[in-house]
Amino acid sequence: MRKLITLFACSIAMLHASANEAPVPAAKPDADAARKLAAELSKPASAKPVEKASIAALAAAADKEVKAEKAEKANAPAKASAATADRVASSISAPSEEEAQVELSVKIAERLAEMRAKQAARVAAANRAKRAAEAKRKKEAALAAAPKISNHWDYEGEFGPENWGKINPAWSQCGSGKRQSPIDLRDGIKVDLAEIDFNYRPSLFTEIDNGKTVQVNVAGGNFITIGNQSFELVQFHFHRPSEEKINGKGTEMVIHLEHRGPGGKLAIVAVLLERGKANEAIQTVWNNIPLEKQQQVAPGIEIDPLELLPERREYYTYMGSQTTPPCLENVLWLVMKQPMTASPAQMALFSRLYPLNARPVQAGEGRMIKESN
C-alpha cells in the first residue's frame, strides 16, 4: 500500500516538473502538500503512519492541479487570440488616430487660411473705401475751389454783369476785354462819315421771348452798306433802359438791329427810344409776343424795319463788343443821333416784361469815337 502511494506521488511530481508553464498561484499550496506527503511516505516504516485524511487531501490536490493545467492549456489559445485581436485593433486604431489628427490639422489650416483671406479682403475693402473717400473729398474740394462754369447769365445778382467773365471761361472777355460795350459816347471826333445805306423792305418774321428780351428774327434780304462793306439784318431786340449814353445821358429804351457781315463780323445799329408818338412796327411786335418764354411764333405777316429808323441818319461809330455774353469784341457800333419815339403804353408794356435788361456802361479805354458832322 505504501509503495502504491509512493508511486502515485512520484507520478504527480513528474507531471508537475514536465509542465511548460509555471503553475498558477492557486495550485502552489497543493503542490507543497504533495511534496510533504511524498517525504512522509519515503520515511522508514518506523515513522508515523500516514493518516487517511492526508492521503485523500493529496489525491484531491493532485486532481485539482491536473484540472488547472488542462484549463490553462485550453485558455492559452483564447488568450493568444485576444492578444492578437488587441494588437490588430491597436494597429488599426493607431493610423486612424493619426489620420484624424492630420485631418483636424488640415481643417484648422483651412479655417485659418479662410479667416486670413476674409481679414485681408476686409482690409482691402477698407483701403479702397478710404481711397475712394479721399478722392471724392479732393474732387469736391477742387470743384469748390474752381470757378463755377455755367451758361446762365442775368442782369442782377450772382449771375449779373459784374460776374459774366467769371461764370464761363468762354465769356472771359466780359471781364477782361479792352473794347467792351456799351460806352458813354462823348468827345467824339466830328468827321464826314459815310452815309449808311439802309436797304430794308417789309419782311416775314418770327418772334421769341428768350428770357432776356423780346427778339424779332427777320427774313433774309435786308442789308445795310457802309462804304464798301455790306451787312445783312438778322434780328432786332429791345433793352430797358438804353445801354448807350450820349454825353452821360440815356433814354428809357433802345432798339438794337443786329447785322452780320463777312467773316462773322457784326454791325449793330442802335436806335434810342423816347416817350412820344406810338410806333407802328413796335406795336406789331407787341401784338405778337408769345404767351410763354422760349416759345417762338411765326405770325405770317410782314414787318418793315424802316419804321424803326429816324428820319435823320447821322450817327456815332466806334469799335466795341456784344453787350451780352460772350461779349466778343468784333462789333462795329452805329448809334443813331436822333432818337425814335414809342408811346407811354408801349413803354409800359415792355417794362412789365423786363424792367431792367441793360448792361452798365463799360470803360472807354481810350477808344476813338467818330460822329457825323
Image: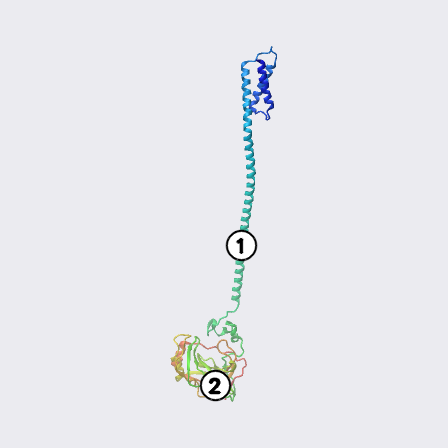
Q: Position of residue 315 (x, y in %)?
A: 48, 86
Q: What's the mark number on residue 224?
A: 2
Q: Is residue 275 left or right of residue 80?
A: left
The spot of residue 322 in percent (x, y) is 49, 78
Quarter of the N terminus within the rendering: top right
Of residues 290 and 118, the one drawn nearer to the viewer in this rendering: 118
Residue placed furthest toward the top: 46
Mark-to-mark CA distance, 2 and 1: 75 Å
Q: Amino acid at mark 2?
A: Ile
Q: Earlier in the sequence, mark 2 or mark 1?
A: 1
Q: Viewer-nearest of labels 2 and 1?
A: 1
Q: Is residue 2 visible?
A: yes
Name the residue tied to disc 1: 121
User: How many other residues sit within 10 Å of disc 2, few (<14), some (14-19) or many (≥20)?
Assistant: many
Is disc 1 surrounded by few (<14), some (14 to 19) or many (20+) residues within 10 Å?
Answer: few
For residue 292, above or below residue 110 = below
Mark 1 residue element: helix
Pointer 2 and pointer 1: residues touching (CB < 8 Å)?
no
- Tell me which amino acid carries mark 1: Ala
Element under disc 2: strand
Can you tell which quarter of the image residue 131 is in?
bottom right
Tell me what residue is drawn at x 54 percent, y 49 percent: 110
